Image (cartoon, grey):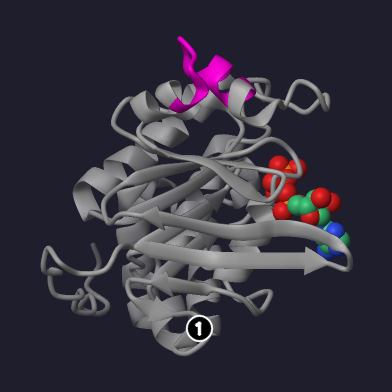
Amino acid sequence: MTDLAPPAPRDPPLPDEAPPALAVAGVTHAFGARKALDDVSLTVPRGSFTALLGPNGAGKTTLFSLITRLYDNRTGSIRVLGHDVRREPAAALSRLGVVFQARTLDLDLSVMQNLVYHATLHGIGFGRAKARALEALESVGLADRARDKVRQLSGGQMRRVEIARALMHRPRLLLLDEPTVGLDIGSRAALVAEVRRLIAREGIGVLWATHIIEEIEAGDRIVVLHRGRVRAEGSPQELLAAGRAPDLASAFLALTGAGEAGETHGGGEA
Ligand SMILES: Nc1ncnc2c1ncn2[C@@H]1O[C@H](COP(=O)(O)OP(=O)(O)OP(=O)(O)O)[C@@H](O)[C@H]1O
């Protein structure tokens, strides 16, 4: 840690009956005549790894854009730790961290400069920002790279810096939109493992959008999204039952018919 500023107090522990990290209910969103999301409801429990599994065009990014208020949800409700993103946007967004698909780090700045710059944009003073940055880098195993230029990092390490940046304000819900795209198999596995460690340590809820079935583990929750509709939600075992299939890849195919449209599925993104 650092001697520059004491870390800010954490939120007190939540009682068991506290609301889930994310609750989406009855959300529909259209671009012109095309419905990108159609009456979507799903839950991310606190401390869970919830995979939002959907082929290209399923509506994953649109859902993230609604949760983060890039788009306004006109139907249904979206609650982060019980706070409605429309009625209490500040309370909801302060508990939310996001890693978008597109990379947005400044390659010519150091890791620390990227994080501190981001924090000061959000009104966090320099001393506190530096302390938070070190804390966040520690939580993704990159504290020893704080002074390196981002350009010197691997793709997987850059993703971890983006996760650290999303953790700077200590969110209780972390959204990641296809974070492993473009990473090799080893970096992909390391990144998923890092996020799982984060959940175990911090108890945050994670919504992990992907179409890569290999990223899912037995204790996870899965929401299958296809053509804007939730096709299944539950444990891997429940998904197997819903798809009447012997393995997750076959269940996913059965639930989405993704093969028909030539859409991707499974671990194609090495
Ligand atoms: N800005 C937009 N204008 C019009 N249509 C859009 C826009 N954004 C998304 N769509 C459409 O909405 C649907 C859902 O797209 P979205 O990007 O949310 O899917 P996705 O699951 O994130 O896909 P991918 O895995 O390819 O990123 C698609 O049919 C897409 O063409």
Quarter of the rendering containing residue 252: top right
Q: Name the residue nearer the viewer: 270 or 62.
A: 62
Check disc 1 and report the residue beneath it. 122
Residue 38 is situated, as x and y percent measured from the top left of the image, at 67, 58
Residue 185 seen in the current view: yes
Say above or below: 253 vs 137: above
Q: Residues within 10 Å of mark 1 (few under 14, many from 20)?
A: few
Q: Relative to 160, is 169 on the left or the right?
A: left
Residue 86 is situated, as x and y percent measured from the top left of the image, at 53, 85
Magenta region's main secondary structure? Answer: helix
Q: Residue at x 61, y 22 (%)?
A: 254
Q: How many discs mark residues in the rendered view? A: 1
Q: Relative to 73, is 137 on the left or the right?
A: left
Residue 13 is situated, as x and y percent measured from the top left of the image, at 12, 69
Quarter of the N terminus within the rendering: bottom left
Q: In the rendered structure, which amino acid carries the disc numbered 1?
A: His
Residue 213 is situated, as x and y percent measured from the top left of the image, at 53, 25
User: What is the residue that sits farthest to the top in this orientation?
Assistant: 246
Q: Residue at x 35, y 24 (%)?
A: 237
Say above or below: 120 vs 226: below
Magenta stretch in the rendered image: 242-253
